[in-house]
Structures are given as structure tokens and as C-alpha cells.
Image (cartoon, rainbow, N blue to C red):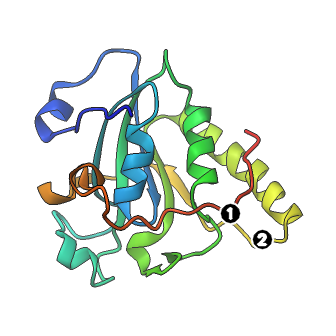
Amino acid sequence: MNICPSITKETLAKGFPASYRQVMFGMGCFWGAEKLFWQQVGVRGTAVGYAGGHTIMPNYQEVCTDTTGHVEVVLVVYDSNLVSFESLLKLFWENHNPTQGMRQGNDIGSQYRSVIFCTTKEQLEQALISKEHYQQQLINQNYGTITTEISMVPPFYFAEDYHQKYLMKNPNGYCGLKGTGINCLV
């Protein structure tokens, strides 16, 4: 199993090679989402954190109160020479239910909503197009409307150290990640 390095504040500040790109995905609890992406060829680093809310420097306890507006996200750094953004979008759509609103399965609250936070206009355009295509596939299978928020990247706040690579440190830990069973034809 491929386990890419954790991204830290220091590695993020240093920057990355020209072919590296960043994106944030929220698809329920960030533990399972991080594991999904760290296993992918071409992903060069991951970190879990909070984004999309109004509280500066939130912590886990605050985010769990459902009052900060933040969502649990995984920051993914990938080498665009080795993995396409479309491949990452396919993983995103297929591995959670983007029609559930403020929840994923038994995890309920705004911190579990579905999001894609893009770092480039090209990513934003690709994500919006993929949403339209996947929506049609879901409708064909009697699913509802996709509630995924897609926008340019807001500030990212690192989650506490014990959350980083949590399922590597706790292989039997909770992971509620579950898709619809519908393949994404991106």
C-alpha cells in the first residue's frame, strides 16, 4: 500500500515542484478520505484540516459544535504528470454519497458536507463539469440532487496532529466512507 507523506505547515510554506497541484476534498469524516487519497499513485502528500467556515484557527471540538461553518477536508498534493485531476474527481464522486447534504451516513453535521475546493480555474471548471455528468448518472439510478459545494479554495487550517494519518496509526479505526455504487464516467 502506498502511503504518501503528511503535508506539514513547513512543507506547505516551502512550496512544491511546478507539476504539483493542490485541491481539497470534503466527503464526510476526513480520516477515510485521507486514506483513500494517500493510497493513490501520483499523490505526493495529504493533510487533514478544516476549511470553508468563518472561525479563524478552529479546533476539532469547535468544528463539532456545528457553529463554525467549517468542513472536515483532506488537502491533496498531487503530481499532475502522474495522476490527472479527473482521476481524483472520479475517486471523490464514487467514494461517498454527494446527495446527503449535511451528513455522510451516520456522521451528521455541517462539518461532514461534500465539498471540492479548487486552487485553479481549470480545476473549478473540470469539477463543475464532472458534477453535471455524475448528477445525470445519479438521476438515472433514482438518486437525488448533488449537494456538493464547489468553489475556489478558502483558507485551510490543519487539524490536530492526532488526526493526521489517523487510519495509518489506528488501522481498525472508524471509517464511514461509503459510495453509492455508481461509477463516475468522467
The first of marks 2 and 1 along the sequence is 2
Is residue 51 visible in the rendered image? The answer is yes
Mark 1, residue position = 180
Question: What crowding class fits label 1: few (fewer than 14 Cα within 10 Å), some (14-19), or many (20 or more)?
Answer: some
What's the mark number on residue 145?
A: none
Separation of marks 2 and 1 at Cα, in angstroms: 9 Å
Name the residue at 34% across, 45% down.
75
Q: Position of residue 5 (x, y in %)?
A: 24, 33
Residue lying farthest to the right in this orientation: 140
Quadrant for residue 56, please give it.
bottom left
Q: Is residue 125 left or right of residue 39?
A: right
Q: Position of residue 174 (x, y in %)?
A: 35, 68
Question: What crowding class fits label 2: few (fewer than 14 Cα within 10 Å), some (14-19), or many (20 or more)?
Answer: some
Name the residue at 63% across, 42% down.
90
Q: Position of residue 132 (x, y in %)?
A: 75, 52
Name the residue at 11% across, 34% down.
10
Is residue 160 visible in the rendered image? The answer is no
Compared to residue 171, the image places residue 81 above or below, namely above
Q: Secondary structure at mark 1?
A: loop
Q: Are marks 2 and 1 in contact (CB under 8 Å)?
A: yes
Identity, as a three-letter code, of the amino acid under mark 1: Thr
Identity, as a three-letter code, of the amino acid under mark 2: Tyr
Compared to residue 12, the image places residue 155 above or below, namely below
Q: Is residue 12 left or right of residue 111?
A: left
Task: Quadrant for the N terminus, please.
Answer: top left
Mark 2, residue position = 143
Compared to residue 162, the image places residue 113 above or below, namely below
Closer to the camera in the image, 141 or 49: 141
Closer to the camera in the image, 97 or 67: 97
